Amino acid sequence: MRRILTVWVVLLGLALAQYENRLLVGFQESQAIYPGGGTVAFGSAKLIAEALGLGYLEASGKVYLSLGSRVAAFGISSQGADAARFLNAYRYQGSLWVPVRELARNLDLYYRNDYGAPVLALRPARLLEVRRAVAGSSERYILRFDRDVQVRLLANNPPRLAMIGVREVPDAPPNSPVSYSREDWGTEIYLPQGNDPPRLLFLPKQVVVERGGLTRLPRVVLDAGHGGTDTGVVVGSLREKDLVLSVSQRLQKLLQGRLEVILTRNSDRAVPLLARAQYATSAQVFISLHATAGNRVTVFSHPEVQTLRLLEKGRELSARTPANQRAVLERYVAAPGSAARFAQGVSEGFATAGIVATTSQDAMYVLSMAGGAAILLEVGFEQLRTPQGREQVAEVLARAIFSYLGLPEASPPRTAAPTPNPGPTGGARP
């Protein structure tokens, strides 16, 4: 019996040894390394991106992998121990290696560990609906999924797209112009033929296929901070999440009809920070609204020196792009200094209303992916405690937005003054 047990242990050891330094990515077998002699498995960033159809970008000392609107960003370390400790990418033998489990967490990938061999794969996704929308001369097909997915354009006209990892699709109505074909890697979708090449826009759990003229309205995204179980700062019976939602809804009403306005939340619900930041990628103006105890107002913009390389590249291309195509690029890539200029305009708007506001540049994640003019605004509770005060803040922001976009004001501004209420203080900017 002891001999049988010894043989079984030896065989098990040999079996486990066969799995050492293996990484299974989708249907491919690759190599895993363990920098610094640790237990954290790393895989080749490029190989993982190719095997799973992920987006890949190496720029400004970081490597980015994306799945739909989700982005995983890793700093780069040249020392294995540092890479394992800080979960950075590891530059090894001329290639970049990323921590597999951390990548899976950021992109919501399937991950498990079989006998010491990490397994990484896409989670199966479902296409929930395809909706067509027309705005002026612009036509959109909105693809809504149950999770973020990667979509690739395979052909322009008629549009043919690869929906990687999508295993289920809705039944097409009779005589529908939309059709599908199942593939080993997911599903292809065929859209009706048109006159213009399509453009892809990634939003949380959505992909927008757009074509046609660019006469549509400028896009403004309003991000009411916190929500759900995250109340933010609380002063007496007032909660930050409620006050900023009220301001965003009031501001939406002031902008509607002249601008395309999107709210990251329109109810008391939680929105992940990554999703908020991703909304900013397609906005010409992005405002993240927050409240703070007291009466101070601060307007934050992201430092230009920390701009994503993707945005810098877009600015470089803009100067060499023909005018008829530049309009497309400029919707997603604002000129240098745009955010700071918009922040200054907001500050001056508050000053005109008799409210002192300061500007500051700080590296805030919610602003880090923005291609347009993006700010984070902190307004004191004393300005927000009454409906009149919240309306005044919304009016200040509406005037600043119209001014930044070069549009005339819709109507003379109202000047209802908020009632001050020195209350208890507490909390800090999240």
Image (tube, rainbow, N blue to C red):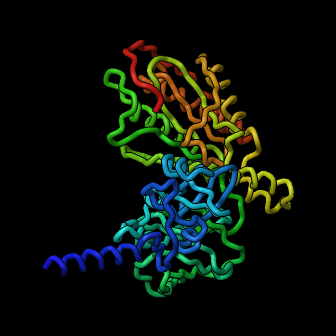
> Where is residue 8 shown, x and y percent of the image?
24, 78
| Image quarter of residue 114 | bottom left
Say whether residue 12 is left or right of residue 257: left
Report whether 75 appears left or right of 32: right
Q: Is residue 389 above or below residue 192?
A: above
Which residue is the extreme one toward the top? 422
Whether residue 400 is visible, yes or no, is: yes
Q: Residue at x 44, y 82 (%)?
A: 172
For image coordinates 76% across by 57% down, the residue present is 327
Q: Position of residue 281 (x, y in %)?
A: 61, 52
Q: Quadrant of the N terminus?
A: bottom left
Identity of the residue drawn at 58% across and 48% down? 280
Q: Position of residue 329 (x, y in %)?
A: 74, 57
Task: Give the vertical position of 93 relative to 243 (above or below).
Answer: below
Residue 140 shows up from this direction: no
Residue 76 place in picture, x, y as percent = 61, 51
- Toward the front, the furthest residue is 3
In this picture, residue 425 sits left or right of residue 323:
left
